[in-house]
Image (cartoon, grey):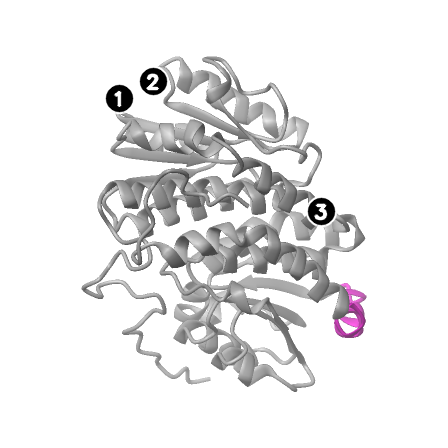
């Protein structure tokens, strides 16, 4: 696959991030093989739980891992036909009695790149402490992380390990995010996702071929915007949140990034707009939901300078008003459910963040060399909870 940086020089300050963005299609194929090989043990663990009408499913993680849960929640609630909630570990740990107020059988699905973040470990322990019956599905990229080690071999836990290459060495979560999200869809979502990883992989490979990245991402970054807004509806709101975080992280907070739903943006957050703002709208593949995405695109294109509003879409020909460069395509993904669509769509945001970081003379592999923000969070004091 063509390197996603196009003609930009790549030195030691970006090598990990560049590689980890580029490797994703290959890792997604590997994720599909891993889940298929684990299918029998996963089903033995999950089927008895899913047969219970009172089971609560909680998706948890911190930062990017929390956004994986937000993205997945609508799709999994629909597929499983039951109560599914996305609760960040940072919220669960600070208010465990509030988030675990109902003592019902619970499946806690933990997303963790390293598995060593204090909140990730504490969240599972608090669930064990406060709930009479809790089961754990740990989806992690690090076999040696504490979360994986703590839950290995426990009868009420299953650890689903991602490909080794997904444990990103760069500062920002890229391949770890997409691999864990895809693995959860395959593990919990059922046969509807069979063959989808290959479609996602081919789509991204086609995006990064030739001059497509220069024409889309490169042109946007070359405008030198001072603000960027990501909008999405349903599962794609979680994608918008992750996209904004990538830009903030890799530019060291120097590029203001905002995320909202396509409809919610009008209710206050629209105040962020000025003539140096660019907007990326993720268009839903759901015909009903996508109408709201198109509405905000039409509205914003009427008030912002030409070329300031981009639609990321798998629907050929839709979203273009000022020319084809207003539409960033996701080839071959028409009809793919939005939660899966997001796995490919986020690559555009990763590339924006990478290029904006390099354009600012920063080092994407470590945009905070003085250590004020760390790859694995530090400085957290965990307090004991008295029953």
Q: Residue at x 43, y 27 (%)?
A: 215
In-front residue for pair 128/328? 328
Q: CA distance from mark 1 to mark 3?
A: 39 Å
Assess disc 3: are there few (<14), some (14-19) or many (≥20) residues with their C-alpha within 10 Å of its C-alpha.
many
Q: Which residues are magenta?
A: 39-53
Q: CA distance from mark 3 to mark 2?
A: 36 Å
Q: Earlier in the sequence, mark 1 or mark 3?
A: 3
Q: CA distance from mark 1 to mark 2?
A: 6 Å
The reply to whether callout 1 and callout 3 are in contact (CB within 8 Å) is: no
Q: Residue 225: image x %, image y %? A: 27, 30
Secondary structure of the residue carrying tag 3 is helix
Residue 304's label in the rendered image is 2
Magenta-drawn stretch, dominant element (helix, strand or loop)? helix
In-front residue for pair 363/38? 363
The reply to whether callout 1 and callout 2 are in contact (CB within 8 Å) is: yes
Residue 275's label in the rendered image is 1
Assess disc 2: are there few (<14), some (14-19) or many (≥20) residues with their C-alpha within 10 Å of its C-alpha.
some
**Residue 98 in the figure: left or right of residue 283:** left
Secondary structure of the residue carrying tag 1 is loop
Q: Residue 382: image x %, image y %? A: 35, 79
Q: Residue at x 37, y 27 (%)?
A: 219
Asked which quadrant contains residue 19, the reply is bottom left
The reply to whether callout 3 and callout 2 are in contact (CB within 8 Å) is: no
Residue 196's label in the rendered image is 3
In-front residue for pair 148/71? 148
């Amino acid at each position: 696959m063509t390197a996603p940086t196009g003609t930009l020089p790549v030195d030691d300050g970006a090598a990990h991030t560049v590689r980890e963005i580029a490797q994703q299609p290959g890792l997604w194929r590997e994720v599909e093989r891993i889940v298929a090989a684990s299918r029998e043990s996963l089903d033995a663990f999950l089927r008895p739980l899913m047969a219970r009408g009172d089971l609560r499913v909680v998706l948890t993680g911190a930062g990017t891992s929390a956004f994986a849960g937000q993205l997945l929640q609508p799709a999994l609630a629909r597929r499983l036909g039951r109560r599914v909630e996305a609760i960040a570990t940072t919220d669960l740990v600070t208010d465990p009695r509030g988030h675990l107020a109902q003592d019902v059988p619970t499946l806690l699905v933990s997303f963790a790149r390293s598995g060593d973040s204090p909140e990730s470990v504490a969240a599972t322990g608090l669930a064990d402490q406060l709930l009479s019956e809790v089961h754990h599905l740990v989806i992690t990229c690090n076999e040696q992380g504490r979360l994986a080690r703590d839950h290995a071999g426990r009868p009420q836990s299953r650890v689903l390990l991602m490909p080794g290459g997904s444990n990103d060495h760069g500062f920002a979560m890229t391949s770890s995010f997409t691999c864990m999200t895809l693995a959860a869809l395959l593990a919990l979502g059922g046969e509807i996702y069979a063959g989808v990883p290959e479609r996602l992989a081919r789509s991204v490979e086609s995006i990064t071929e030739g001059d497509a990245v220069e024409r889309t991402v490169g042109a946007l970054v070359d405008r030198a915007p001072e603000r960027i807004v990501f909008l999405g509806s349903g599962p794609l709101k979680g994608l918008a949140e992750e996209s904004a975080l990538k830009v903030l992280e890799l530019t060291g907070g120097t590029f203001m990034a905002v995320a909202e739903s396509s409809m919610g943006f009008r209710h206050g957050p629209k105040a962020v707009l000025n003539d140096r703002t660019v907007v990326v709208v993720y268009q839903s593949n759901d015909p009903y939901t996508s109408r709201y995405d198109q509405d905000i695109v039409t509205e914003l294109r009427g008030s912002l300078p030409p070329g300031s509003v981009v639609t990321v879409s798998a629907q050929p020909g839709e979203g273009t008003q000022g020319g084809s460069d207003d539409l960033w395509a996701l080839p071959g993904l028409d009809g793919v459910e939005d939660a899966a669509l997001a796995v490919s769509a986020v690559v555009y945001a990763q590339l924006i963040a990478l290029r904006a970081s390099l354009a600012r003379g920063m080092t994407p592999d470590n945009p905070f060399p003085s250590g004020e923000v760390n790859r694995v969070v530090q400085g957290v004091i965990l307090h004991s909870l008295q029953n």
